[in-house]
Amino acid sequence: MTRTHRRRRWFLAAAPLGALVALTLAQPALAGTATLNQPDSPNAQSIDSIYRAVLGVTVTIFVLVGGWLVYSAIRFRERPGREYPDPPQVRGSTRLEIGWTIVPILILVGLSAFTFYKLPKVTDVPKGAMQIVVTAQQYSWTFTYPDGKHPAGPNTLVVPVDTPIHLNMHSKDVVHDFWVEQLGQKQDVFPNRITHTWFQADRIGDYTGQCAEFCGSGHATMTIVVRVLSKQDYLNYMSTKATT
Amino acid sequence: MATAASPAQAVPSAPSGNTLRSWITTVDHKRIGLLYLLVTLFFFLTGGLMALVIRLQLETASGTVVSAETYDQIFTMHGTTMVFLFTVPVAAAFGNYFVPLQIGARDMAFPKLNAASFWLLLFGGMTMYSSFAFGGAPDAGWTGYTPLSVISPGHGIDFWIVGLHILSLSSILSAINFICTIHNMRAPGMRLTRMPLFTWCIEFYSIMLIGALPVLSGALTMLLLDRNYGTHFFTADGGSPILYQHLFWFFGHPEVYVVALPGFGIISEIVPVFSRKPLFGYKALVYSAAAIAFLAFLVWGHHMFATGFSTPVNIWFMVASLAIAVPTGVKIFNWIGTLWMGRIRYEPPMLFAIGFILLFMIGGLSGVFVAVFPIDQQVTDSYFVVAHFHYVMGSIPVFAVLGGLHYWYPKMTGRMLNRSLGIWSFWVLFVGFNMTFFPMHAMGLSGMPRRISSYPQHPGWERMNEIATLGSFVLSIGVLLVVYNCVTALRSGRVAGDDPWRANTLEWYTSSPPPPHNFDSLPPIRSERPLADLRAEAAG
């Protein structure tokens, strides 16, 4: 068998292997280790699908190129105690080099295109979202509702399920960052500046998050709980807390 | 210009011999290189000790080893030390020692300035560390984000600013010196197109330092004024905290490649020597280094995807960042192309080089995740990013720099390192490195932010942290093995001879260690591998 044939067979074996690894990693059981935590908001879900696409592509590249590296490193090793002549002194190959410049460009263009296709679902806030003002300070979060009240106390945000929530955020002191991973992307919170993020929880329950920008010695304690209630429970909750 | 380097060239004379005075007053590039190496490796061990405290603190969810305040100081000094006192200046250590040798020069262009760069480095490091004795170290992270760094009490941040100013000065002076040396001191025949890749990479390293560091110095000066003289550049009341981030990362991203390129250079020296082949695509490797150096100045915004840029700005920084993957990929492919059909000798430097390529590939591929901004908006400031930059910024010092140390130790000391100990250190480091940093991807994906001193509400993160902590101790054992090998080989190592590796570049033409004047004579230089040409001629 010629060397070219052997090389081709090796690549043919490696490519499905890469795809297999990518498929395995796509299993939900690996959420929080190989993939992001279970996303429960449309923006988080879109990011999750972009993440999985990038994971599939990068793992395949790693298996192929890493495999090529390890294979060459083993295949062409010198056995100790034997004297070898110099190998052919190849100085490069313009065709190959142009190839491995263009192929990565094509892969990256593909990944970018997929990202842009998914992007509107990450950035666009649905119409009619509930507006909540978020005030960050060392080391707590205050959530103020449209009626000017903050019923749930510091660090806790109570919202109805399946309802778009738009957060308008500012800080009283240093830079903080609002991050509840399962409900979408991080957003830095600055003094003298309003920044925005949004989510729409599609499952009832408590979501934990915390400040993701180092803000001082209490940084680790600056946690966030988003309590998602059914629409009816939410109305009941708000009416009992109406005086706070 | 190429004729400037002759042995007769006047160099300020220094006392010879091995007296303390001769080392303190030395202007010999090789001695200065060794001093750089000793001091940077000392800071590497110091930064490593602080990393162990970090890992011990995070081993349990309650984090009770040190207080939150101490923890903040320790991770700040760990990052600052590793970046500014180790990974950047260690390139100058090898650069000082080997750039003049690789281009067949007598010394650096400005030997006294060279000595000044070294002493400024030591002085800058001491200034920063003296903050521990004066009421507390800096505690705002190695990035020193405002306004936290403006309002941080005590003088830790002021020590940090002044220390960084001194270190920047040291780096800029040494960068100017490298550029002048490379452009004016090359031996006859050593055209730019025949320069060893390591020297090329030091050239780009220097250009990038000169482009990036003044911006950092400007930002630090404004921060100093904000803290002490009532200005409002970055303050919460009227200033622009985000401006600091722009300035810092305009410096900070090129800094990543300032660290990476000399590492690439070292790998590009080792791989062809131990494959017994010329570099596959010498020119492509030079051009890709140039492309990386240029693109590095266009991508700072990818550190700021969570600050709330408009979508077009995000898209620009994403596309520019992804573009860096192309020249980086070219490097990796060309290294593997060099291995292909080679005759690979497994001496320790080669193991380190192959390990580096594999690990850097992981860091490069996780870089694709953080360049795609919607993903970055999930993983930035989480442990995923900590994993990513340790696979990049950590694999370079541990594998490329220690690989370089194994490669050049015989030249610098005249003795061989113990081979089996070298192989053992590699494997221990390789296992320890992956145990420490690979689980950090998972920590970040499961929501763990960086720079937290405890996580009592998430006991589920403990398991991954335990693995990382255990790994960090394995990694430390590997580092100690290397130190032990270097110390014992100094006395008991096998005598190396001029060229123990059958290497290609001029530093291996002279004796080990080289005499003060470097070369008695030079071979003809007709390619980037003058010594391989000599061997081919001798063989007929």
Image (spheres, rainbow, N blue to C red):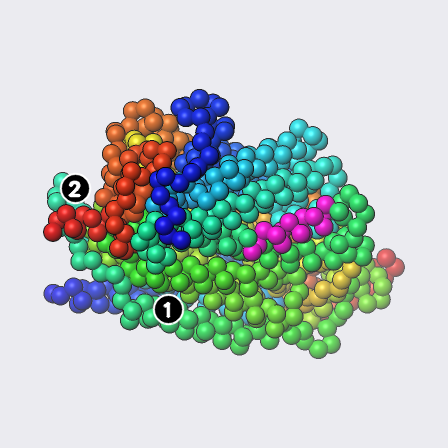
Q: Position of residue B180 (x, y in %)?
A: 47, 50
Q: Quadrant of residue A162?
A: bottom right
Magenta residue span: B211-224
Picture coordinates of residue B471, whole percent (x, y) = 44, 40
Residue at 30 percent across and 50 percent down: it is B271
Q: Which chain carries label 2?
A: A
At 64% from the left and 56% from the top, the residue drawn is B247
Residue B400 picture location, percent across and down? 39, 46
Contact between marks 2 and 1 (CB within 8 A): the answer is no
> Relative to the observer, which residue lies in front, B155 or B64?
B155
Work out whether residue A172 or residue A199 is closer to the camera in this orientation and state it.
A172
Q: What residue type is labelled 2?
A: Pro
Instruction: Give the left or right position of residue B211, taking residue A93 as reference.
Output: right
Q: Is residue A216 magenta?
A: no
B217 inside magenta stretch: yes
Q: Mark 1 points at which residue?
A: A101
| Chain of the residue on which disc 1 is drawn | A
- Give the number of marks: 2
Picture layout, residue A77 above or below residue A194: above
Do circles 2 and 1 both sit on a common chain? yes
> Judging from the image, what secondary structure is the residue with disc 1 in?
helix
Q: Tag 1: residue type? A: Thr
Q: How many residues crowd mark 1 within 10 Å: few (<14), some (14–19), many (20+)?
A: some
